[in-house]
Image (cartoon, helix red, strand yellow):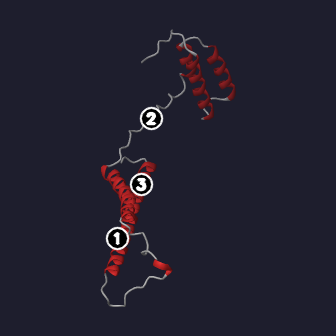
Amino acid sequence: MARTPSLRASDLDREQIAERLQVAATEGRLRTDELEERLEATYSARTYGELDALVSDLPAPPRSAPPPARQRVPAWAGLAIVLGLFTLLALPMATVRRGAIAGPGPNVGGQPQAYPAPGRFDQQILANHAHGALVMAASVAALLAFATVAVAVSWLVTRARSGRRL
């Protein structure tokens, strides 16, 4: 939209011209005495025409870049984070509920628990091994879930910092 030279300028318009003049002075386009003269004329200007005359011999200000487009998180990264967090929270809780981390059985009469002789197939040994395997599987799954979440999050952060589209 073109500005009509005879229209009256606002304080904001004067401030913008003053900033443009100060930038020009820092770039070496205006000497200090020229800057002072033009700033004085800027603040006393009444119309757009008077303001435009003060910067007519200066290059146009750079256009501001449009805001960056909102970056979308890829579906696989979101799914990896959700599944990883679910696994990280659900599997250890499932093993606790099943008693896998409950520890050894009751200590009756203060006597240490006796384990059967080596080589003897016993239900208690089988149960202890099953619980241990379940705890180990849950621990490994939790570590894999944590690693998946960590990789997905670090990938997203790296992409966001580099400014590349996701």
List the residue tagged with mark 3: 153
Q: Nearer the viewer, residue 37 or 43?
A: 43
First in residue order: circle 2 vs circle 1: 2
For the residues marked 3 and 2, what is the alpha-carbon distance in whole angstroms? 28 Å
Label 1 sits on a secondary structure element that is helix
Pointer 1 and pointer 3: residues touching (CB < 8 Å)? no
Q: Residues within 10 Å of mark 1 (few under 14, many from 20)?
A: some
User: Quadrant location of residue 17?
Assistant: top right
Residue 48 image offset from top left, x and y in percent: 53, 14
Can you tell which of label 2 and label 1 is closer to the viewer?
Answer: 1
- Most distant residue in the front direction: 109
List the residue tagged with mark 2: 65
Tell me the residue at 44%/74% (across/down): 106
Label 2 sits on a secondary structure element that is loop
For the residues marked 2 and 1, what is the alpha-carbon distance in whole angstroms? 56 Å
Q: Report whether 157 appears left or right of 45.
A: left
Residue 23 image offset from top left, x and y in percent: 59, 31
Tell me the residue at 36%/62% (across/down): 94
Q: Return the mark for residue 134.
A: 1
Where 122 sits versus 102, above or below?
below
For the residues marked 1 and 3, what is the alpha-carbon distance in whole angstroms? 28 Å
Q: How many marks?
A: 3
Amino acid carrying mark 2 in the image: Ala
First in residue order: circle 3 vs circle 2: 2
Amino acid carrying mark 1 in the image: Leu
